[in-house]
Image (tube, rainbow, N blue to C red):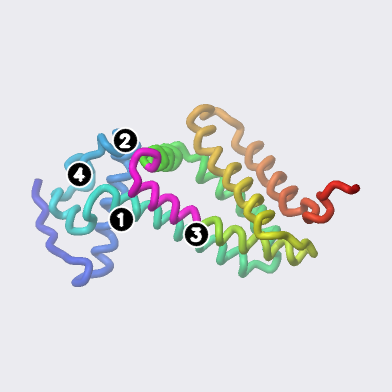
Amino acid sequence: MQDTDTTTPHADAPRATARRQQILCAAAQCFREHGFHGASIAKISAIAGMSPGHIYHYFENKEAIIAAIVAQDLESLLEMTAQFRAACNVRAALIERAAEGVAKQLDPDAAGLKLEIVAEAARNPRVAQIVSEADATCRRELAALIRDIRSRAGHQDSAAAIDGMVEVLACLFEGLLQRTIRNPGLDRDKVTQRIQIAIGDLLNQPGEDALKPRS
């Protein structure tokens, strides 16, 4: 295989970014089709159309490739939360945009890739760290968003209560990854509607004081 591109990230940033994305797309396909361990750098290079040495120019190893994929997903979520905060009605924006989140989670290719990364995290401490750190950032951002929505509605919640709501949302969306694989014929419109209702109910639930048993 010939690869005459000697461009470095410092010499040509736009082209380097495109090359990195080319590698990430090829790696994602390999991870889905062959699993993390079956997706060798040689296979990734064949799909990307570049030499293994050129891939190593951008990524030290497959863990670094996974880190970049996870970072892209995290950046997308952070951009979305920023858009929520800029909305006139943050609660309504969150519920409305949940449809996009459901669609992404139910995409079979995306689901296959994310599940493969999580599976590798269960075996590989380095990948586990990458996934855990990204998840912590996601949870912090969602917690701040939910706290803001609940505060505007007059609710006073402890950090533990907000964290619990975040975990429920995570379970809702991450569970979709398995459902789209196990039940590819599910009614996506109905699932989307039900999840939007569930999010609305979660944001509207009474504050902690109202939930305490009365003596």
Q: Closer to the camera: disc 3 or disc 2? A: 3
Specify which label sits upstream in the sequence, 2 or 4. 2
Q: Label 1 belongs to which residue?
A: 21
- Front residue (pair 52, 136): 136
The kind of residue on which mark 1 rests is Gln
Name the residue located 23 percent from the left edge and 50 percent from the top edge.
Answer: 61
Task: Quarter of the image for the N terminus: give it.
Answer: top left
Q: Closer to the camera: disc 1 or disc 2? A: 2
Residue numbers of the magenta segment = 121-136
Q: Label 3 belongs to which residue?
A: 137
Specify which label sits upstream in the sequence, 3 or 4. 4
Specify which label sits upstream in the sequence, 3 or 1. 1
Vertical placement of residue 69 versus 153, above or below: above
In magenta stretch: residue 138: no
Residue lying at the far right of the rendered structure: 215
Q: Label 2 belongs to which residue?
A: 35
The kind of residue on which mark 2 rests is Gly
Label 3 crowd (10 A; few <14 / some 14-19 / many >=20): some
Q: Are marks 2 and 4 in contact (CB under 8 Å)?
A: no
Mark 2 lies on a secondary structure that is: helix
Mark 1 lies on a secondary structure that is: helix
Residue 148 appears left or right of 102: right
Q: Closer to the camera: disc 1 or disc 4? A: 4
